[in-house]
Image: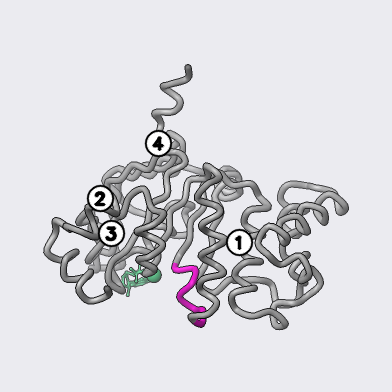
Amino acid sequence: MRQTEHAVPAIEFRHVSKSYGDFSVLQDLNLQIAAGEVVVICGPSGSGKSTLIRTINRLENYEYGDILIAGQTTRTLRQRQLQVLRAGIGFVFQQFNLYAHLSARDNITLALRQVLGVNRDDARQRADALLAKVGLPDKADHFPAQLSGGQQQRVAIARTLAMQPSILLFDEPTSALDPEMIAEVLAVMRQLTHTGITMLVVTHEMGFARELADRIVFMDQGQILEVATPEQFFTQPAHPRAQRFLQQIL
Ligand code: ADP
Ligand code: MG
């Protein structure tokens, strides 16, 4: 058995700190996420959740500490290595970030062809299979403006999955959606929790967190104040600020 390999966390924060001028946005973060784990990050607005997940693929730099992906430091990566790292880490944004001038299919095939060098026919086949997987088999030729927010976000998830990432990061993927569209996106995310992909999800959807997270990370003012199972977190949160947060949102 390859136990030592399995023991290496998919993502590890070691004493990570970051500031904007005098403002300390991340303060000495320590966290280990195992391969295949589903972790939800929650906390008040402005607590550093987006900054935390954006540091993982270095959309944001950090000044102190280290973030390791599968045991490899990300601190010293050069541009080319950074591209390789990012190709293996999917990122789903609140605002979908689809290319407006490309069809749903072409949004998905673009990186497959340009980054992975997949040929046109194979890329097309993979895109169409993924669109079917996210429940949009008939939308391949539609442009983003012709799709609802929920459909756009599902295309964005399909685009991310096309790269076959081992890690998926979600930054409030349903926060820009009307309530009736939230469920369809959460349903796609629920499917993904069974695939073995490591998932780190910033969300206020506490139903999703409670049902599907292996662990909950609670942040406030740039600090991780609590890491707990959903069971612990929702029934007896240890930190007073977590208790207050839950009273406000539940
Ligand atoms: P969250 O996602 O939890 O709402 P963020 O990570 O977006 O929090 O932001 C944490 C804090 O950092 C906020 O107070 C925000 O105003 C501040 N911040 C974020 N980006 C910048 C920036 N580029 N320059 C200065 N302050 C920033
Ligand atoms: Mg945010």
Q: Secondary structure at mark 4?
A: loop
Measured as percent of width and height from the top left, residue 216 is found at 31, 54
Give the number of the mark in front: 2 or 3: 2
Spatial CA distance of label 3 from label 1 is 27 Å
Measured as percent of width and height from the top left, residue 4 is found at 41, 22
Relative horizontal placement of residue 165, taking residue 213 as reference (left or right): right
| Nearer to me, 100 or 192 | 192
Amino acid carrying label 2: it is Ala
Segment colored magenta: 172-178
Marking on residue 26: 3
Spatial CA distance of label 2 from label 1 is 27 Å
Which one is earlier in the sequence, the residue at label 2 or at label 1?
Answer: 1
Relative horizontal placement of residue 228, taking residue 153 as reference (left or right): left
Choose top left, top right, bottom left or bottom right for residue 236.
bottom left
Q: Secondary structure at mark 1?
A: helix
Marks 3,4: beta carbons within 8 A = no
Choose top left, top right, bottom left or bottom right for residue 200.
bottom left
Which quadrant contains ligand 2? Answer: bottom left
Q: Secondary structure at mark 3?
A: strand
Residue underneath mark 1: 157
Amino acid carrying label 1: it is Ile
Measured as percent of width and height from the top left, residue 101 is found at 75, 76
Spatial CA distance of label 2 from label 4 is 17 Å
Marking on residue 9: 4
Which one is earlier in the sequence, the residue at label 2 or at label 3?
Answer: 3
